[in-house]
Image (spheres, helix red, strand yellow):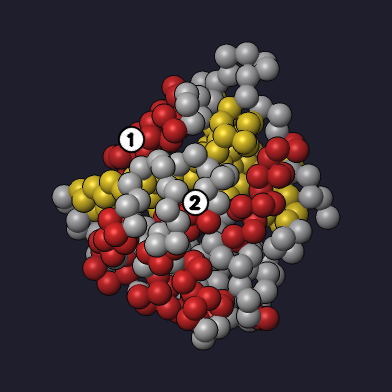
Amino acid sequence: METKPAEISSSKMFGGYNKRYKHFSTTLGCSMTFHIYFPPSPSTSHKFPVLYWLSGLTCTDENFIIKSGAQRTASSEGVALIAPDTSPRGLNVEGEADSWDFGLGAGFYLNATQEKWKNWRMYDYVVKELPQLLSENFPRLDTSRASISGHSMGGHGALTIYLKNLDKYKSVSAFSPIANPINCPWGQKAFTNYLGVNKASWEEYDATCLIAKFHDVLATILIDQGEDDKFLHDQLLPKKFEEACRKGNAPVLLRLQPGYDHSYYFIATFIDDHIRHHAQALNL
């Protein structure tokens, strides 16, 4: 089983390249794919900072790369984009494909503690294995300069991973994040199955709970949320996160965007602002 990443596709875009890779993940116990967008390089020795993008429910590593248009500004700002998949694949765990909001495509960026779902360790994959893999195999990437972003379930992942690893990421942003999962149906379903019934363990993967524990958030947390998002009031709950940030004196900018929904049309509209937000934090 090849742990070293093998290139499986390459497409030129805005002077750089979208490249897709496959490797065997020792963390997840299966083969995984991920995308890198390499901007055009000013020299052979130039190293790019990285922006990790975590996608939402049902997505793979392809959705963001194909639909967002983020490469235009990533190219001009000189930021490499890293898009991993959203769950383990090919393990054939009973029930993994029974519903769209749990199992396949729904890893929730946590480390499952329940035996049946023990391979669902997307937190360790994103925070530990993938950065090390990139550092060891792609000399054009400077993984010591990293930021993180995501959408919906991936917005939840970006916020929680950032808050628990402030030494690893320069900044965070999110589109329509599941901001208070312990209080919404998606989160409650996932956490019950992955983590069990002890709700204290759930709080370790809830951004609204975590923000109260961390008082050294320096970079402004940027969140864009569509006001016509059908999931806004029962699943996403960004106002709960904003309120927790205010109480903890954490800098947050929650932008409610009139007329926009939960789709990649919304993401594509505002993604340039997010790329520039991270480029500034990465001192470009």
Badge 1, how many Cα within 10 Å: few under 14, some, many 20+?
some
Q: As drawn, which residue projects farthest toward the bottom?
A: 197
Name the secondary structure under disc 1.
Answer: helix
Q: Is residue 64 visible?
A: no
At horizontal 60% and vertical 61% (from top left) the residue drawn is 122
Assess disc 2: are there few (<14), some (14-19) or many (≥20) residues with their C-alpha within 10 Å of its C-alpha.
Answer: many
Along the line of sight, the residue nearer the viewer: 248 or 44: 248
Q: Amino acid at mark 1?
A: Asp
What is the spatial separation of the Cα atoms under label 1 and label 2, in whole angstroms? 19 Å
Label drawn at residue 162: 2
Q: Which residue is mark 1?
A: 273
Which percent across, then down, holds residue 176?
A: 33, 56
Residue at x 64%, y 31% (from the top left corner):
141
Residue 196, percent from left and from top: 55, 83
Of the numbered discs 1 and 2, the one sitting upstream in the chain is: 2
Q: Is residue 129 above or below residue 209?
A: above
Q: Position of residue 221 (x, y in %)?
A: 36, 46
Q: Nearer the viewer, residue 62 or 139?
A: 139
Q: Is residue 140 above or below residue 169?
A: above
Write down the quadrant of residue 213 in the picture.
bottom left
Quadrant for the N terminus in the image: bottom right
Question: x, y (%) of residue 79?
Answer: 51, 30
Q: Nearer the viewer, residue 113 or 153?
A: 113
- Report the amino acid beneath label 2: Tyr
159 on left or right of 23: left
Numbered circles on residues, count: 2
